[in-house]
Image (spheres, rainbow, N blue to C red):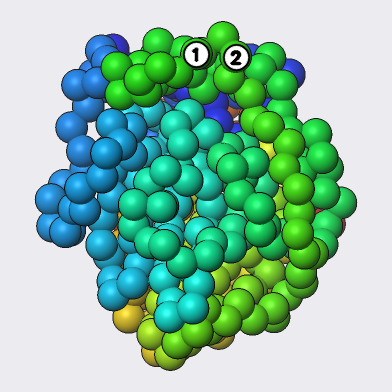
């Protein structure tokens, strides 16, 4: 059975894109990752093979799986639902940064407090609901100074907009002990400080640069630890189908962001992503930029269903060896060139 769940869509667009994603995933079955589960139940889902290569850190949580991915860097994964979202705890001498807070299905704060006693600052890679679910648990939150971010913080998201996240097809409820699916919503949170591109987060012995990377969302950011050679890319890049079809998607901004990431990627040793598997090779940033350039220059043919010219009327899908793009059709002009 193929189970499709929608994660970055406003509720009123879900029905429109459900068929799109189903057909897309049938075509991209080997790389569709978090939106496809070929098992009957997420409780039976095997973890991705990369996790067996990482050092697991035991915690009391039944929902989260924690892995040490570099010195002072913990990946806090939620592999028991279709999002397979990954947040990161980055520890310095004086304080720690939590990059994203996940789905809000279980308390991430309790996990973080088992890993460190340092003061915690939160920053989100962007404010889609699968990355801000537990923001409300924290007192010190940095946020990009955009209307999009401020609105998400003030309003949260009602149960009617996110109820599909906790359906029996999308989640292993056995792992979310004591969780009430009927009350699930994204709570509002209080921003402590509004920041902008280039902001430096000083953790003591570790300085992190905030790089604005709009495109997927207006407030998307990438984190760079230049001295350590680490980059955290959020949803701007991960090894799977990259979704560029939400109402807030801006392909021209995304193109510019990829150019900046490529420039900033010199000297990287590891890239940490926000879905599926935590660790990617730095060469993927170069490959990502090259692949997207091929699309917008009309040099890359979309993935087709059989001999048909396109998958459907809503999204155009482009497949590469280590990732893919699913782009809303009306964002692309003739031969893939971005509409202006």
Residue 229 in picture, x, y percent from top left: 39, 83
Residue 318 in picture, x, y percent from top left: 48, 47
Nearer the observer, 52 or 104: 104
Residue drawn at the location 29% of the way across and 17% of the way down? 174
Q: Which structural element holds mark 1?
A: loop
The reply to whether the C-beta atoms of the residues labelled 1 and 2 are less than 8 Å apart is yes
Establish if 58 lies above or below 183: below
Do we see residue 261 in this rendering?
Answer: yes
Residue 212 in picture, x, y percent from top left: 68, 69
* Position of residue 327 in the picture relative to residue 205 (left or right): right
Decide: few, some or many residues near mark 1? Use Cα within 10 Å; few <14, some 14-19, many ≥20. few
Image quarter in which the N terminus is found:
top left
Establish if 274 lies above or below 91: above
Q: Name the residue under label 2.
A: 183
Decide: few, some or many residues near mark 2? Use Cα within 10 Å; few <14, some 14-19, many ≥20. few
Q: In the drawing, what numbered circle is on residue 46?
A: none
* Position of residue 26 in the picture relative to residue 226 (left or right): left
Establish if 297 lies above or below 276: below
Image quarter in which the C terminus is found:
bottom right
Nearer the observer, 311 or 13: 13
Q: In the drawing, what numbered circle is on residue 180?
A: 1
Residue 79 in picture, x, y percent from top left: 32, 36
Residue drawn at the location 32% of the way across and 80% of the way down? 269
Measure the alpha-carbon separation of dots 1 and 2. Answer: 6 Å
Q: Residue furthest left?
A: 52
Q: Which structural element holds mark 2?
A: helix
Nearer the observer, 8 or 65: 65
* Position of residue 195 in the picture relative to residue 306 (left or right): right
Residue drawn at the location 33% of the way across and 72% of the way down? 72
Do we see residue 239 in this rendering?
Answer: no
Q: Which residue lies furthest to the right in this view?
A: 147
């Amino acid at each position: 059975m193929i189970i499709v769940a929608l994660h970055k869509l406003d509720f009123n667009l879900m029905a429109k894109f459900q068929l799109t994603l189903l057909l897309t995933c049938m075509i991209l079955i080997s790389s569709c990752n978090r939106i496809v589960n070929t098992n009957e139940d997420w409780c039976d889902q095997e973890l991705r093979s990369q996790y067996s290569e990482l050092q697991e850190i035991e915690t009391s949580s039944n929902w989260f799986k924690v892995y040490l991915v570099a010195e002072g860097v913990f990946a806090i994964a939620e592999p028991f639902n279709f999002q397979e979202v990954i947040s990161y705890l980055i520890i310095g001498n004086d304080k720690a940064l939590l990059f994203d807070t996940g789905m809000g299905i279980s308390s991430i704060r309790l996990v973080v407090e088992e890993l460190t006693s340092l003061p915690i600052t939160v920053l989100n890679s962007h404010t889609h609901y699968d990355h801000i679910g537990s923001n409300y648990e924290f007192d010190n939150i940095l946020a990009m100074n955009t209307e999009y971010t401020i609105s998400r913080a003030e309003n949260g998201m009602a149960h009617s907009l996110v109820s599909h996240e906790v359906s029996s097809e999308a989640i292993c409820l056995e792992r979310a002990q004591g969780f009430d699916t009927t009350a699930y919503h994204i709570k509002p949170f209080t921003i402590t400080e509004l920041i902008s591109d280039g902001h430096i987060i000083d953790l003591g012995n570790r300085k992190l640069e905030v790089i604005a990377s709009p495109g997927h969302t207006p407030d998307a950011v990438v984190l760079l630890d230049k001295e350590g050679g680490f980059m955290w890319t959020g949803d701007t890049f991960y090894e799977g189908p990259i979704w560029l079809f939400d109402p807030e998607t801006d392909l021209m901004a995304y193109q510019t962001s990829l150019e900046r990431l490529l420039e900033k990627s010199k000297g990287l040793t590891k890239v940490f992503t926000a879905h599926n598997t935590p660790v990617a090779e730095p060469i993927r940033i170069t490959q990502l930029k090259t692949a997207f350039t091929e699309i917008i220059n009309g040099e890359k043919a979309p993935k087709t269903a059989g001999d048909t010219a396109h998958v459907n009327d809503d999204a155009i899908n482009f497949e590469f060896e280590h990732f893919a793009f699913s782009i809303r059709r009306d964002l692309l002009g003739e031969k893939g060139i971005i509409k202006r």
